[in-house]
Image (cartoon, coloured by chain):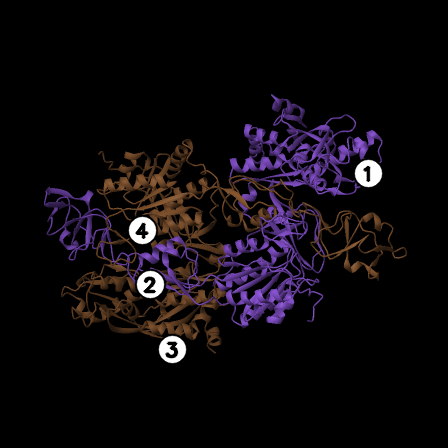
Chain colours: A purple, B brown
Amino acid sequence: MKRKVYLDDLPLERAIERYFAHLQEIGTLNPGPPELIPAEEALNRVTALPVYARNSSPHYHASAMDGFVVHSTSTYGASESTPVQLKVGEETVLVDTGDPVPAGFDAVIMIEDIHYVQPDLIEIIHPATPWQHVRAVGEDIIATEMIVPANHQVRPVDIGAFLAGGVNDIYVHPCPRVALLPTGTELVQPGSELLPGDIVEFNSRIFGAMAKQWGAVALRRDITADDFDSLKTVISSAVDEADIVIVNAGSSAGSEDYTADVIQSLGKVLVHGIATKPGKPVILGEIKGKPVIGVPGYPVSAYLVMELFVKPLVYRKLGLHPPDIKKVEATVSRKLVSPMGVEEFVRVKLGQVSDKIIATPVSRGAGILMSLVRADGMIRVPRLSEGYNGGDIALVELFRPLEEIKDTTVIIGSHDITLDVLANFLRLKYPSSSLSSAHVGSLGGLSAIKRGESHCAGIHLLDEETGDYNTTYVKKLLPGRDVVLVNLVYREQGLILAAGNPKNIRTLEDLAGNGISFVNRQRGSGTRILLDYHLSELGINDDNIHGYEHEEYTHMAVAAAVKAGAADAGLGIRAAAQALGLEFIGIAEERYDLCIPVEFMETPYIQRLLEVISLTEFKEEVVKLGGYDLRDCGKVMWHSNKARENLLLV
Amino acid sequence: MKRKVYLDDLPLERAIERYFAHLQEIGTLNPGPPELIPAEEALNRVTALPVYARNSSPHYHASAMDGFVVHSTSTYGASESTPVQLKVGEETVLVDTGDPVPAGFDAVIMIEDIHYVQPDLIEIIHPATPWQHVRAVGEDIIATEMIVPANHQVRPVDIGAFLAGGVNDIYVHPCPRVALLPTGTELVQPGSELLPGDIVEFNSRIFGAMAKQWGAVALRRDITADDFDSLKTVISSAVDEADIVIVNAGSSAGSEDYTADVIQSLGKVLVHGIATKPGKPVILGEIKGKPVIGVPGYPVSAYLVMELFVKPLVYRKLGLHPPDIKKVEATVSRKLVSPMGVEEFVRVKLGQVSDKIIATPVSRGAGILMSLVRADGMIRVPRLSEGYNGGDIALVELFRPLEEIKDTTVIIGSHDITLDVLANFLRLKYPSSSLSSAHVGSLGGLSAIKRGESHCAGIHLLDEETGDYNTTYVKKLLPGRDVVLVNLVYREQGLILAAGNPKNIRTLEDLAGNGISFVNRQRGSGTRILLDYHLSELGINDDNIHGYEHEEYTHMAVAAAVKAGAADAGLGIRAAAQALGLEFIGIAEERYDLCIPVEFMETPYIQRLLEVISLTEFKEEVVKLGGYDLRDCGKVMWHSNKARENLLLV
């Protein structure tokens, strides 16, 4: 077997062009043979043929009012001075709305407009015009008229019109069947007990839900081991059963990547490798006239390949054009470097701060699924660009509606678990709103405020001189900016240690030497400043702490590193240790405040936040996390404008 | 039983306020008790609780590359001049991507960067930094972190993150159950044989599809007759089974409208009658803490009431905010008069002509379901407005995406059945495009061209002096406008008569007197001009034609009137007679052209049209309709600019 070792680097647009041209040529992009289904069940299906009415609606001349039917000629000349009298049962008949207009009559007079002379004799004082208050046959739908054309996605009102027009069954395009083949010896089904090296097979579930959203039917298959022959068998049978086959993964060129070879042995590989990041190791193939696509294993790569290649395939087979992706122009918050020669898809968080939409990149790793969960959109950095400078405008493809993004409170700064609780209560109380929090440390949070990228910052910055929290830094870093500090929590910082404290660590001094490995927080975080403050107080040199340069961005990441044995100790909050069942030795209580530019104080972004943190339910939930004190929660601790501070404090 | 005879006229916003305040007060707007479902099946469901990760992902330190794991300290000092050698199996181990990093190691060196000295000895020339090429525990998801908050609608990537985080079941809000109770003695199920007075019960199918689209579960019940006690029984039982109850109809104040009385007898009517058009006879009630809504019978009223009241109810019970309705500012094409004191919802067709979005009202009757099927959007004319003048800007709520509307060819003018065939082929060939045709007669079509409201007009205008078609009128009505006439079809006009021609009508002369009733086309239509021309040729006075003032807007409407016995004869095209199985006596062949402003000739709007009418399949389909001759189809018949005409004709 000839093995292909290097991947191509085909530009995305060339890959799309080459692949779809081939599929077009062999007729694969056309919908399958029409399917006859009940009109009632046709919601969101796509018509394969135009739908023509079989009956008219109404199918008889119907009275549009409660009243009397008449023949218009018998009412001519009626006026107040020359009323016309009509014999009920002969010259006129009482009808309700919807009743048929009997033969020989052509108009209806409303019940309000007649006068009873006798029970069987009415009098009118206005003539009726022919067809007044009559819903004539076909007023709504005329038999044989086209209700909707072919390639029309059926809406609720269409279903009504089909039934009104006597069409009880319609021809629709079949839903394309997408076979999903998870492959990999390391994969296990969700719910299995996990051993080191096991990876939960969740990609096919993402693909299945995507396919369903697009209008396809997903056929998910069991996991296939990395073995050429097994793979060949399952791909062959999937090609027979489905319209589109997705093989995940084995799409790269490693020692156990058989997908390309199998596709080549059964059919044809048209593209192997594209110049995108993530998404590079894709295989675009065809077997027996069916598209077979090798999708990379990392979830972000896989998601992109599904969006870029499988989505348009599904829509084409449905006779539809994929819905346009909504886009917005946003200001890139900081320098975003991207390699030349590669089209990069950078996930970003978005928020409207003052009058600008700000885009802040989230984690760029292809393996970070949470970067997709957390992102509000995606920037495509073109192949021949090196990226953006902070302040540049970039086009962002939206993952959620712009209105929702505009309704999002943006908090950038230090990480605290309380922010998750806050996000949750905010959403419960205001379903249209949300909280977007980015964890860049306290100093990073103040920089974001300075650059106008956020509505508030979470900070806990110890002034080593005075022992005071936050005010010194705010004065120094935001000179002339009118801001308010509102307390969120006091929290306990300390050593996070393995359960049972096997290395018997008691103090910060124990970290130096002794073969103890440490996991640190990133430069600029309040926790890092706290550590450095204590180390210098104790006269301990960084170099003596093994792992000082191993940086994590959140308390939970530090706790997780300790939990996994990657480090013996870290500095962080009690809640993080408690969440993972770790040992904790308290070192200091620190004040965690929200720094809020005064111009946002009265906006819903901040007012809702302040409302939520004042709720008893919120406070109870936070206390449960452990290590928190809420004695000043919601209190204004400081205001850069002294006069106003006093007002606010009242 | 006290009967309420008159409806209120409550402004819409007051009705919403009153009703939702009441429902809020009694707790009806909250979601039901959470439901535990498999995460895999949670697409589009809404979380009732925040979802916290149970496992970290990865749950072990995983190699991110194919390569050798090492302890970083053992690589310090490696360089080209001082390479470091490591013993395979002791100081280093070969791993594949995804393999666990064994205890005692903390970095991976890529396979490309090592050199084999012996099979069990490798050499490296760069030191490894701690944790390089290692996916540390929790790199993607850390156990206990919040994956999504409550009130979050689940997307495909969320499902992946739940499973990756070890969460196999999640709590979601239950889908609200909406009971749909069709009521009315006149209603019959779709598919029944129709007798005069029978109305097909299709409203509940529209409601069911709407409810499904919003995320609710529809419980459709059988038809209930208009009878107080039966109604009481079904409403009672629906209240016990569902979260929201829809009674359709009996919501007005007529003699058989029991809905309000029944609701009042079981619970409470909060609003009966609102100041909207359509939608006025709505009942907003509550029984045992459940919303019970009486929805009017006319489909357009019913649709509106569902949108205005039921949709927000469903979303509230799902913990979601209803998605914002997309809106666009459009130029109202002609005067739109709307009564003061009533908020009117006017359905409009939209199209982009040059740089303006043009809104043209369609039929305004509450009974015209096709007005919703055909509409692209809706204008809300405020209660205290009398409407719009032609050229005014109005805000339009969109029924389909703006991009699709911008991709629509707008044809306004005379009606011809061929346009349906054209619309269909256009859609088949270009799934993103569509044809919007409005039928206002030939002269109306030229006016629309003049006002810049359409891309082309379908016209068949006989010059009574010369016997020529179209050019005379175009010259007269569009002076100075550079337009092209492209032939679509020749078609046969004649008398449309009942099957078997029972009144033995042979010529136009037979229409005068003799007790023959006629159905006419509207003033300005080419067919009306043709009739008037022939009548004057024959010296027949309009007054002698009974029904001359009974106007219809399309050939099919004329044929339908004859079919239903509302008239003995009408003038129209053979295809209309043939479609309904009627008798036809030919009178004239006429030329039906497309009048196209030259500035649109090269746009996709027109180019696609010209492409489609040149297709053999299109022509074959048209010929099948009967009475058409396509000898000049697609040919330029005339050009206002003589020099260019010759060019085009070559």
| Residue mark closest to the camera, 2 vs 4 | 2
Q: Element type at marker 1?
A: loop
Residue B631: assigned label: 3
| Residue mark closest to the camera, 3 vs 1 | 1
Structural distance between the alpha carbons of marks 3 and 2: 25 Å
Judged from this view, the residue extending furthest toward the right is B81
Structural distance between the alpha carbons of marks 2 and 4: 19 Å
Label 3 in the same subunit as label 2: no
The amino acid marked with disc number 3 is Arg
Structural distance between the alpha carbons of marks 3 and 1: 92 Å
Give the mark, 1 or 2, whose residue is nearer the N terminus.
Answer: 2
Is B329 on the left-hand or right-hand side of B465? right
The amino acid marked with disc number 1 is Ile
Chain of the residue on which disc 1 is drawn: A
The residue that disc 4 covers is B365
| Residue mark closest to the camera, 4 vs 3 | 4
Q: Element type at marker 3?
A: loop
Structural distance between the alpha carbons of marks 1 and 2: 83 Å
Label 2 in the same subunit as label 4: no
Q: Determine if residue A55 is in view.
A: yes
The residue that disc 2 covers is A145
